[in-house]
Image (cartoon, rainbow, N blue to C red):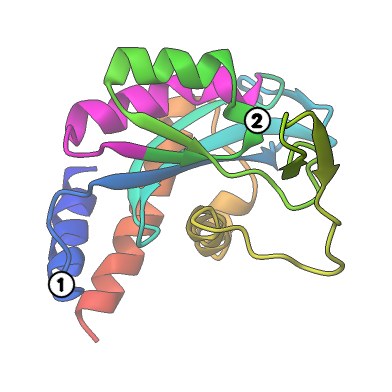
Amino acid sequence: EQMHDRLRAQWRERMDRDEKPSAAVLDSQSTRSSPQGGESGYDAGKKVKGRKRSLVVDTLGLLLAVSISAASVQDRDAADDAVTSSMGKYPSVNTLFVDSAYAGKWAQRMQHIHAVQIQVIRGSNNRRTGKWHSEQGDLFTAAPAPSGFVVMPKRWVVERTHAWNERARRLIMHHDRLLDVSAAWVWLAEARMLARRLTT
């Protein structure tokens, strides 16, 4: 983890960014587990039996924190450790972008605990996305859902990070009994990617 953090700081410097990030993005991904055993569960929403990988990344998509849990754990509960770790290591972060799964009481609690602004990026097909009309503001028209693939503002960087990780054969499926070992493989894959960038 410390090796990765040094490499990430070097890459941010090369990209003319401050070493300490001021904004971060949170997202989770459920991936399958092998029959090796260890803690796992079933994510009914994504129809995946395995573990959930919660990532906090900077606006370049570089890893700030990761936590692993059973896939059956709700996104907002699984993310607590990753958010706490990232805010502890990087108090410079003042804005955290999340999707609608983290809205509501969880977002309010994180804002209170970590003094960070939570910005919820809702999908374009979300019924709460639209415009209010009339002087009283009592008429709401939902925005029409666009067809095809839609890039989500800010949140696309963490989706790309998930895709980067899946290039590593070891991260396609969880093979380890211990959650800490699964997290260590994420740090190693990200450090390897940064080392390759910095030497080319």
The secondary structure that most of the magenta stretch takes on is helix
Can residue 136 be seen from the camera position used here? yes
Q: Residue at x 22, y 58 (%)?
A: 8
Q: Which residue is mark 1?
A: 16
| Left or right, residue 51 beside residue 120 | right
Residue 90 percent across, percent down from the top left: 19, 36
Please give left or right for residue 194 compared with residue 20 in the image. Answer: right
Q: Which residues make up the magenta segment?
A: 74-95
**Which residue is found at the position 19% from the left and 50% from the top?**
5
Say which element carries label 2: helix
Q: In the figure, residue 111 lies in which quadrant?
A: top left
| Crowd around label 2: few <14 · some 14–19 · many ≥20 (10 Å) | some
Is 59 part of what is drawn in magenta? no
**Is label 1 in a helix, a strand or a loop?**
loop
Q: Quadrant of the C terminus?
A: bottom left
For marks 2 and 1, give the CA distance: 33 Å
Q: Residue type at mark 1?
A: Asp
Q: Judge from the rendering whether residue 13 lies leftward or rightward of residue 128; answer left or right.
A: left
Three-letter code, disc 2: Ala
Q: Quickly name the residue at label 2.
A: 101
